[in-house]
Amino acid sequence: MKKLALAAPWIFTLIWSSGFVVAKYGFEDSDSLYFLALRLLLAAAILFFLTVALRQPLKLSREDIYATVLIGLSLHGLYLGGVWYAIELGAPAGLSSVITSMQPILVSVLAVRLLAEPLTKKQIAGLFLGLSGVVLVVLPKLTGTSGFTAESLALLFVALAGSTIATLLQKKIGRDIPLMIGTTYQFLLAGIVMLAISIARGRTRFELTHTSFWAMAWAVLITSIAAILLLLWLLNHGTAAKVSSLLYLVPPMAVLQAYVLFQEKVAPIGIVGIALTALGVALVIQS
């Protein structure tokens, strides 16, 4: 268990950051919100059968259902829907990463008051050091505003609010929810909402190709089921500030993955940013 606790944050960061790569592949053959709807509904079905097969609890109390609805809509609806739709509208991936990576600052400050979690001077230094590193990593990507609109900016702030709310709710009212069935209901509810929005907008394109198949498979099995279960497990076994600080590593990790897969070069200032980000996260986690 101790080894899992040490490795889990880094495993989570690796697979969570891969979502940006999946999005780049997925948008080639589908509409963003419709892709998300299918992804969430498939993940819900698979996770339900896993829950039954592993004989995990299936019932939720009224309070648990209420908490699950709020967390699911915030994390899978507002956050994922906001980010994916903003990028589809043309928001630069770098700017999207900067805005959503401000979440740890909001969570850390709000957790002091709402969750009574202490924040040390070392953690404060680590949080701002991490944010500085993220800015340096994505700064070379912010030189142009092509395709960026007020609508996409608003969506990114909605996504930021969604991930912040979900993290605080999980710590405040979601700790006792059975992990697997709770996550199943989160996927199901958010998937139904995304599907309804897609149908209402008349945007239900999904072409089954080799690219879309593997993008969907990775999105369902890895960035949905594996990553979300790991995230909620981390939230239940650590402070909100420490877990949220891991999100600082997502943009740098996404940049590295894009370099490997798409030969997108990293500027020298970006390498400095990656180092600063890693140091900032280490300060928060070890405090």
Image (spheres, helix red, strand yellow):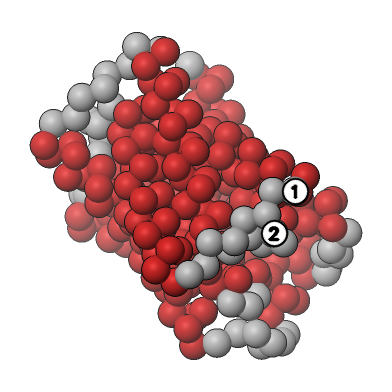
* Residue underneath mark 2: 29
Q: Quadrant of residue 32?
A: bottom right
- Neighbor class of circle 1 (other Cα within 10 Å; few <14, some 14-19, many 20+) is few
**x, y percentage for residue 47?**
44, 28
CA separation in Å, label 2 and label 1: 8 Å
Question: Which amino acid type corresponds to the residue marked 1 in the rendered image?
Answer: Thr
Q: Residue at point 48% right, 16% down?
A: 1
Q: Is residue 143 above or below residue 182?
A: below
Q: Tell which of 242 and 162 is nearer to you.
A: 162
Q: Is residue 72 above or below residue 62?
A: below
First reached walking from the N terminus: tag 2 or tag 1: 2
- Neighbor class of circle 2 (other Cα within 10 Å; few <14, some 14-19, many 20+) is some
**x, y percentage for residue 136?**
68, 70
Question: Which amino acid type corresponds to the residue marked 2 in the rendered image?
Answer: Asp
Q: Is residue 82 above or below residue 52?
A: below
Q: Residue at point 60% right, 70% down?
A: 87
Let me know if residue 104 appears in the view.
no
Let me know if residue 212 appears in the view.
yes
Q: Residue at point 26% right, 55% down?
A: 112
Is label 1 in a helix, a strand or a loop? loop
**Label of residue 209 in the image:** 1
**Label of residue 40 in the image:** none
**x, y percentage for residue 166?**
33, 52
Is label 2 in a helix, a strand or a loop? loop
Q: Residue at point 69% right, 87% down?
A: 146
Quadrant containing the C terminus is top left
Instruction: For the residues labelled 2 and 1, say whether their Cβ atoms are less than 8 Å apart.
Output: yes
